[in-house]
Image (cartoon, rainbow, N blue to C red):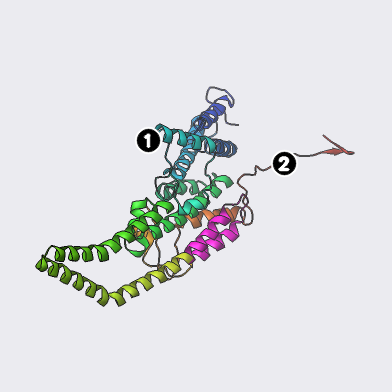
Amino acid sequence: MIVSPNGGESANLDGIERKAVEEFAEPFAFGDSQCQRVLQAWFPVLRKLAAEKAPDNEWQYKRIVDDATEILRDLKGALSRHVKSSDSPFIRNPEEKAKLAKREKEHNGTLWYVPDRWSIRDRPDHWDEASPVSPRYLVAALGKYLARPELQHDLIDWACTNALLFDELARTADGIKSGIAFGKINWAYTLGDGKELTMAWATLGLLFLKFFLRWLLPATLVAGLIYFAWFTAAAIVGATWAVYMLYRLLTYPARRKEHKTQANQLAKYMVAIHRMSAAWVFASSDVVHPGRLRELVISAEGAGTVYPPIHLMSWGVTSITAEGAGIVYRPILHSLLDRMIQRNSSFLAPFITPCEVVPLRWTGWQRI
């Protein structure tokens, strides 16, 4: 037992732990109760570590607890960095604030909630980006977490693994929709803010605008000029239109080849998307097999050539798509999977609290 310098027993240590737990005790904070559960599981390990490093020193224990609390705080913030908060000063609409407050209450006590599959196609309104996760901040927080081998917890491993897989999947799908994957701008995505329904209407509007500018407007303009006897202007407009149509005709083979190349790229992207989805769905279960999960991750990375590299064009994403590979996940994901497998290669149950082993002594048929 660590004893405080003034001769007290563990009262001061209990106070240090209580203060750390209370940091995650706000009513509607994101992921609080699970963070408290993680801290409660870490405290016995941290006490033993402090006793080995500096016996009878409660300040050493406070520093160790503060470091662990900071790591947990960073992980929690990275997993929900792109989720809008009802306390944000940029949100002034009372209805939107009430909706965000209701969502926060529904997800109270959750370190990481698994998004539904529809959110990959249609980004929820309370997200700032294609994914609620900040990959840069999460990688930094996981680096600190993995550097402390005594800080291990199935809930953190499950949440961060699932978040990394989903973030990669969602940003890749968003890159395909936005046109970044093909090196061009999808104006329907820009006008529709990435929403499926608004993108459909924007696509129809753009098709009609293209048809109007290419066919209706020139023909109507030429007819109007002829009607008002402006034959020279009509000839100029008609000749310009004819040159444009001739250009379209001559460039048709190149445009057809480009469309075919884009279709082939899309087919390869869809293979990668399907395998990434399989890995993410498998990791979303309440009980996960880490060995099989790593096989699915490796399968997604070998899904075939994907070019051009989406993530080199995406903001804030460090993954690299290489020739001959589907998606290259962040190296931190493999580090996390390796440690999970070293701990237990066939079982990961983040929501199951291990039962305490009670020593038994038998006298006859009575348990005492």
Determine if residue 250 is in view. yes
Per the model, the C-alpha gap separating discs 1 and 2 is 50 Å
Q: Residue at x 26, y 66 (%)?
A: 215
Tag on residue 283? Answer: none
Front residue of this view, candidates 339 and 185: 185
Q: Could you say which quadrant of the image residue 42 lies in?
A: top right
Of callouts 1 and 2, the N-terminal one: 1
Q: Could you say which quadrant of the image residue 235 lies in?
A: bottom left
Q: Main secondary structure of the magenta part?
A: helix
Q: Secondary structure at mark 1?
A: loop
The residue under label 1 is which amino acid type?
Answer: Ile
Q: Residues within 10 Å of mark 1 (few under 14, many from 20)?
A: some
Please state which of the two labelled residues, at mark 1 or mark 2, is closer to the viewer: 1
The picture places residue 50, in percent across and down from the top left corner, at 54, 36
Front residue of this view, candidates 130 and 335: 130
The picture places residue 364, in percent across and down from the top left corner, at 90, 38
Quarter of the rendering occupied by the N terminus: top right
Q: Is residue 99 left or right of residue 224?
A: right
The residue under label 2 is which amino acid type?
Answer: Val
| Whether residue 24 is situated above or below residue 210 in the rendered picture | above
Quarter of the rendering occupied by the C terminus: top right
Q: Residues within 10 Å of mark 2 (few under 14, many from 20)?
A: few
**Which stretch is magenta?**
271-300
Tag on residue 357? Answer: 2
| Whether residue 98 is situated above or below residue 211 in the rendered picture | above
| Whether residue 34 is situated above or below residue 251 in the rendered picture | above
The picture places residue 51, in percent across and down from the top left corner, at 56, 36
Determine if residue 51 is in view. no
User: Does the segment drawn in magenta span residue 236?
Assistant: no
Tag on residue 91? Answer: 1
Dots 1, 2 in contact, CB < 8 A = no
| Whether residue 232 is situated above or below residue 97 in the rendered picture | below
